[in-house]
Amino acid sequence: MTSHAQTGLEILEDIPFDYEDWEETASEQSWCIKTLKLWFTLIKDYSEENKWCGWENIFYQEADFMTEAMREIEAVADEMAEYIPTTVESFDLKNLDKLLEIEALINHMGGEDYINPDHDDNDSSVCTFMMFVIKDVAEFCGLLPS
């Protein structure tokens, strides 16, 4: 991870994640929805084991996706500072099909600008910390031009 992403995770350790506060607006925030779609798609075998975040469902069943994604985040809310770096270790970065899905998803969401944590649509939630990691991964895998 870049130092920028690492700094973000250190901040998350110091500021506890308030799931109830996040839950109030997360399902309506396009930034949050995009972040979670990328996040769960990157996890090895996750979409195969959890059909709600399978390839078809992340495009056509957005309400169902967010309901389930929010349940997953709620389950790890108390350990969010540990959850993010631990989950990165399970990202499927050697699977070409998975990387093509991520590239297609990034393009579908609006391109490179929309996975930039500094983008105007950023909701300044825990998803920002996740997006720093996702952007690092996408750059590392050569999925972003810059």
Image: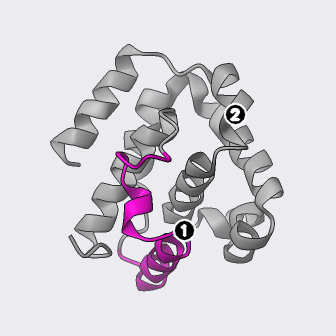
> Camera-side residue: 66 or 48?
66
Residue under numbered circle 2 = 25
Residue 143: give x, y in percent of width and height: 32, 75
Residue 135: give x, y in percent of width and height: 34, 57
Residue under numbered circle 1 = 109
Crowding at label 1, few (<14), some or many (≥20) Cα neighbours within 10 Å? some
Quarter of the image for residue 29 reads: top right
Quarter of the image for residue 95 reads: bottom left
Badge 1 amino acid: Met
Secondary structure of residue under mark 1: loop
Q: For residue 101: magenta?
A: yes
Where residue 10 is drawn, which disc sits there? none
**In the image, what residue occupies the spot 61% across and 62% down?**
46
Question: Can you say whether 107 is above or below 139 in the image?
Answer: below
> Image check: 32 left or right of 64?
left
Residue 117: give x, y in percent of width and height: 37, 47
**In the image, what residue occupies the spot 78% across and 71% down?**
60
**In the image, what residue occupies the spot 81% across and 54% down?**
63
Residue 121: give x, y in percent of width and height: 50, 47
Badge 2 amino acid: Thr
Q: Earlier in the sequence, mark 2 or mark 1?
A: 2
Q: Residues in magenta?
A: 94-121
